[in-house]
Image: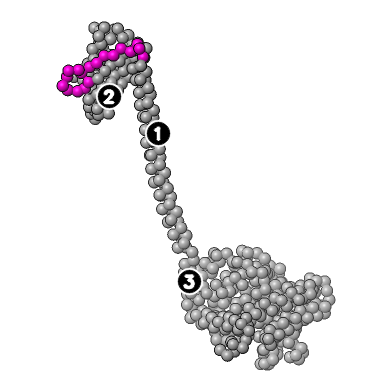
Amino acid sequence: MLLLKILPAGLAFAILQVALRLADDADLARRLKAREPKAMNDLYDRYGRLAYSLICRIVRNASTAEDLVQETFLRVWNRVQSFDAERGALGAWVLTVARNRAIDHLRSVDGRMEAGAIELDHLERPGLFAKLDSAALAMDRVRRLKSAFEKLTPTQRQVIELAYYEGMSQTEMAERLKQPLGTVKTWTRAALKVLRDELAEAAIA
Amino acid sequence: MTCQELQEMFELYALGALEPAEKAEIEAHLARDCDNCRQALSAALALNAGVFTLATSVKPPRRLKRRLLTSVGVHYPGWGWVWALGALCLLVVAAWLGVEERTRTYELADARRALLESDGERDRLTQALQFLSDPQTRPASFGRGQTAPPRGYVFLHPQMGVLLIASNLPAAGSGKTYEMWVIPKGGTPQPAGLFQSDGTRGLHILSGPVDVAAIGTIAVTIEPAAGSATPTMPIIIAAPIGS
């Protein structure tokens, strides 16, 4: 309580929100594991729109997005038993599964899967999200990321979008942008540093 | 590569965007239980998830939730009850409107009928007034001195015809009607039209030219509703027309 008196009201409110959300997510994960009928309803209410928006951004087709959102939530439902309800970041996991389903779809359409593209399955294992910063999707972090994203140069933004929303490797980006691989790597590294630094500042503040 | 050098690659690794050689190198570090690398991976996953939320927000269609919950065997109440309630309300409103419409139709028909009747009544009264006000009209009375009804007057006009006004004239009865007869002097009764009493009064007009001088009697009998070709006894009204 003393902490709440010292902190500015806005920050105190943000912390409180994060705490409540984390408690909610842990409880929701427990209910999902217990197969409570309403848990899936709550999971969708909490992350359905975010997942749908992300998938729409990637596949740019509403009907396909609906199929992929369903696939995403079914995958979470089927694998939630391996998820650490107490320490895991549920939202980050759901969105990662959603993004990977959409990228898998893009790759299968483009024929990139056959070209030896990296299998994404192992990058969304529930165990990976056990020690994650649970506040990954806290409003303050998201706001800072958004502002950092706007600070990127057009080329930096382009490589970030190709990596996150097109699922391209840096070699594929270099081909797409008709730039040397080294240049693309520099742009990507610089862009990620801007985002990372912004979040680090948020953590210090 | 050292752990430090790998730090900048974890976001791309988590996105599956590294080349196979780079990926293998990171996985080798992770396999050694390198704490730095594990923390870096967690931070990268968190950063990536944050970036995923930056996509423009799009509202998913309502059916998606229903479809999803159904697929995992969860009953989805959704808004079905609202639609059902809405449909029920519409049904009630439609039924009420139907009844209202039917009532209105009946009322309209009644009003139209009343209007027509009132128009007919007005025409008859206008015609009767013309009869009474014309100097050529010749009156005759009936029922005087009788203790039983009916009583009244007959008016004859060479162009307009015959007007009969009766008081104390009871209703003809169910399925019956009053029929007026024009009986020429020394001739057989001629049908002169059907009419009803309102229970106490009756008014009937035979329109058209008549030979007043040739008429001996104006009579009225009670006949079946469709009328008769010859009068049925008894004669209810007999108004002799004097020469």
Q: Which residue has dot 1 on it? A: B112
Q: Is disc 2 on the same chain as disc 3?
A: yes
Q: Identify whether B188 is placed above or below A42.
A: above
Name which of mark 3 and mark 2 comes first in the sequence.
3
Q: CA distance from mark 1 to mark 3?
A: 61 Å
Q: Residue at x 55, y 65 (%)?
A: B62
First to last magenta residue range: B134-151
Instruction: Single out the mark in the foreground, 3 or 2.
Output: 2
* Secondary-structure class at tag 1: helix
Q: Is residue B6 left or right of residue B226?
A: right
The chain identifier of the residue carrying mark 3 reads B
Q: Is residue A35 left or right of residue B232?
A: right
| Horizontal and vertical percent position of residue A103 | 67, 72
Marking on residue B74 = 3
Name which of mark 1 and mark 3 comes first in the sequence.
3
Marking on residue A89 = none
| Horizontal and vertical percent position of residue A21 | 56, 80
**Which three-letter amino acid code belongs to the residue tagged 1?**
Arg
Q: Is residue A13 visible?
A: yes
